[in-house]
Image (cartoon, rainbow, N blue to C red):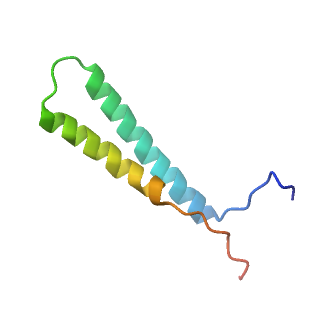
Amino acid sequence: MSENELVIARDELDRLHDDLYALACAVEDTDRDMSAGGTRTVRELTEMLDWLMEAARPLRDREMSAPSTQP
């Protein structure tokens, strides 16, 4: 294995993928809502920001660990 290769546990990779998907959906939803035209209320903008932050926090808090070598 070269220094440019990485070993990661499958379940950890799956969780990372799920969190990235949730963030992508939040960004897409917010982008669509912002592009829809019209004026946004403070409540609507707050809800959009809350949704984005909720989706981003798991990625911010994620720590990747080396896979266990024990069977």
Residue drawn 53% across and 55% down? Answer: 16
In the image, 55: left or right of 13?
Answer: left
Quadrant of the drawing holding the C terminus: bottom right
In the image, 48: left or right of 25?
Answer: left
Residue drawn 51% across and 59% down? Answer: 15
Residue drawn 16% across and 26% down? Answer: 40
In the image, 49: left or right of 25?
Answer: left
Q: Position of residue 52 (x, y in %)?
A: 33, 43
Q: Position of residue 6 (x, y in %)?
A: 74, 57
Res. 42 image quadrant:
top left
Q: Position of residue 39 (x, y in %)?
A: 15, 21
Residue placed furthest toward the right = 2
Q: How many marks?
A: 0
Res. 67 image quadrant:
bottom right
Is residue 53 shown above or below 42? below
Q: Position of residue 57 (x, y in %)?
A: 39, 54
Residue placed furthest toward the bottom = 70
Res. 46 image quadrant:
top left
Is residue 34 shown above or below 12? above
Residue drawn 22% across and 17% down? Answer: 37
Q: Name the residue nearer the viewer: 1 or 57.
A: 57
Quadrant of the drawing holding the N terminus: bottom right
